[in-house]
Image: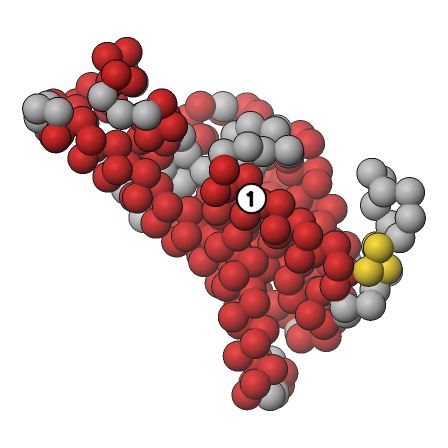
């Protein structure tokens, strides 16, 4: 890929600095900068952006930063710094929006089931805010409903993956016939085939709850980033945006 482009370089630096700080300060960083459910007392408005620079471990940041470099570099060279940054953060914000919207659905679904069983809404929120729950809740609603209810409130989202999925979509639409050489595949695969399959697997995992990638993955954030990336690419292509509008 040659020399690092400006936006990629600075995004890499900021992500690494956040990762180092998280390694030092741990839970305090997750409390301040992860994206919490809006009804959670840890939620703050800046988390809509700051969560994009937080990661849950070394492999998490390694794969995200590799994808940012590998797929983002040709896009920044094609678009320029400002348009690339606009796209990147827009996809990340779209991912946060979809992820939070799905969590609202899960939270309200579980809350409604428990309230209809005669429990008080404020009492329920006090219980889960304290990190507790009652095993009896699983006798009131299906396990998946209660699990999603608890997870939506208590599990924060971290990572650049939503923005990265937007980048993947943009790369696939801009360079559809580029052949990708992947560690887990013995043969090269074109971007126009690999990226839709990857997004399809996330959609399958998000809907069914069965993840082939492992647990603790915000599948709907990935889908949100991909969706917003597609919408922006479609709009820009339709309107033939002049890249010079983004140059300062």
Of 221 and 111, the residue lying toward us: 111
Q: Quadrant of residue 8?
A: bottom right
Q: What's the residue at 84%, 55% (across, down)?
A: 189
Q: Residues within 10 Å of mark 1 (few under 14, many from 20)?
A: some
Of 200 and 234, the residue lying toward us: 200
Q: Quadrant of residue 172?
A: bottom right
Q: What's the residue at 44%, 23% (across, down)?
A: 27
Q: Which residue is mark 1?
A: 204
Q: Secondary structure at mark 1?
A: helix
Q: Quadrant of the N terminus?
A: bottom right
Q: Could you say where residue 88 lies in the image, as x and y percent from the top left?
A: 56, 61
Q: What's the residue at 77%, 69% (across, down)?
A: 175
Judge whether 55 appears above or below 172 on screen: above
Q: Could you say where residue 112 lies in the image, as x and y percent from the top left?
A: 18, 35
The single residue placed furthest to the right in the displayed view is 187
Q: Could you say where residue 126 lies in the image, as x and y percent from the top left?
A: 17, 23
Of 28 and 168, the residue lying toward us: 168
Q: Could you say where residue 129 lies in the image, as x and y percent from the top left?
A: 24, 24
């Amino acid at each position: 890929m040659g020399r690092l482009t400006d936006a990629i370089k600075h995004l890499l630096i900021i992500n690494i600095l956040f990762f180092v700080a998280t390694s030092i300060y741990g839970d305090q960083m997750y409390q301040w900068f992860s994206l919490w459910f809006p009804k959670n007392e840890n939620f703050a408005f800046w988390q809509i952006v700051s969560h994009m620079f937080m990661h849950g471990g070394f492999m998490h940041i390694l794969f995200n930063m590799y994808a940012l470099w590998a797929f983002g570099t040709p896009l920044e060279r094609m678009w320029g710094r400002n348009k690339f940054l606009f796209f990147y953060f827009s996809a990340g914000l779209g991912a946060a929006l979809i992820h939070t919207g799905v969590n609202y659905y899960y939270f309200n679904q579980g809350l409604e089931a428990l309230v209809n069983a005669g429990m008080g809404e404020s009492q329920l929120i006090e219980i889960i805010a304290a990190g507790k729950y009652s095993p009896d809740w699983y006798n009131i609603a299906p396990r998946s409903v209660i699990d999603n209810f608890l997870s939506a409130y208590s599990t924060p989202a971290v990572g650049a993956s939503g923005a990265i999925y937007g980048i993947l979509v943009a790369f696939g639409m801009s360079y559809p016939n580029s052949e990708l050489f992947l560690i887990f595949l013995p043969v090269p695969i074109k971007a126009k085939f690999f990226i839709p399959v990857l997004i399809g697997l996330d959609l399958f995992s998000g809907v069914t709850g069965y993840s082939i990638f492992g647990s603790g993955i915000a599948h709907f954030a990935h889908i949100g980033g991909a969706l917003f990336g597609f919408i922006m690419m479609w709009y820009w292509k339709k309107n033939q945006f002049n890249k010079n509008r983004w140059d300062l």
